[in-house]
Image (cartoon, helix red, strand yellow):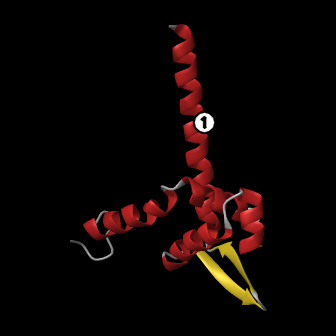
Amino acid sequence: MKSGSMDSDAIYGYHAEFCKMFANPNRLRILGVLSDGEKSVGEISEETGIPQPTVSQHLRKMLDRGVVVKEERGTKNYYEITDPRIVEGMNIMKEVLVDRLGEEAELAGAR
């Protein structure tokens, strides 16, 4: 394994583990809300319709993986996405999926 190589097994392993954070619809909804900026757990719960305890569990996992950061202010915790490239990546994947769904619908209509 080359030192600093982006093709190393370790990088692929880390990449796969990091991407697991985005393999849950609730986490994607939470990240979608956070893409507009910092929010409290209550605000996230209200905007997503996900119960507050569930939001907190997902945020804890994302915090542990470095996807979000937390700031405590009084009795509330506020979260924000650590790197704007996460939002960019999510948006690109969403565009690809929407395009694919459109292509599949066109193919189904042509049958």
At 52% from the left and 15% from the top, the residue drawn is: 108
Q: Nearer the viewer, residue 83 or 28?
A: 28
Residue at the top extreme, as displayed: 111
**Residue 6 in view:** no
Q: Is residue 68 left or right of residue 4?
A: right
Q: Quadrant of residue 5?
A: bottom left
At 75% from the left and 71% from the top, the residue drawn is: 42
Q: Position of residue 72 (x, y in %)?
A: 71, 88
At 57% from the left and 17% from the top, the residue drawn is: 106
Secondary structure beneath label 1: helix
Q: Position of residue 29 (x, y in %)?
A: 64, 56
In the rendered view, would you say 61 is above or below 86?
Answer: below
Q: Quadrant of residue 36?
A: bottom right
| Residue at numbered disc 1 | 98
At 70% from the left and 86% from the top, the residue drawn is: 71
In the rendered view, would you say 104 is above or below 56?
Answer: above
- How many numbered discs, if any? 1
In the rendered view, would you say 92 is above or below 41?
Answer: above
Q: Quadrant of residue 80?
A: bottom right
Packing grade of label 1 (10 A; few <14, some 14-19, many >=20) is few
Q: Is residue 37 left or right of residue 55?
A: right
In the rendered view, would you say 96 is above or below 24?
Answer: above
In the rendered image, the quadrant that contains the N terminus is bottom left
Q: Nearer the viewer, residue 58 or 1?
A: 58
**Residue 24 in view:** yes
Q: Position of residue 63 (x, y in %)?
A: 55, 77
Q: Position of residue 18 (x, y in %)?
A: 44, 66
Question: Which amino acid type is marked by label 1?
Answer: Val
Residue at the bottom extreme, as displayed: 74
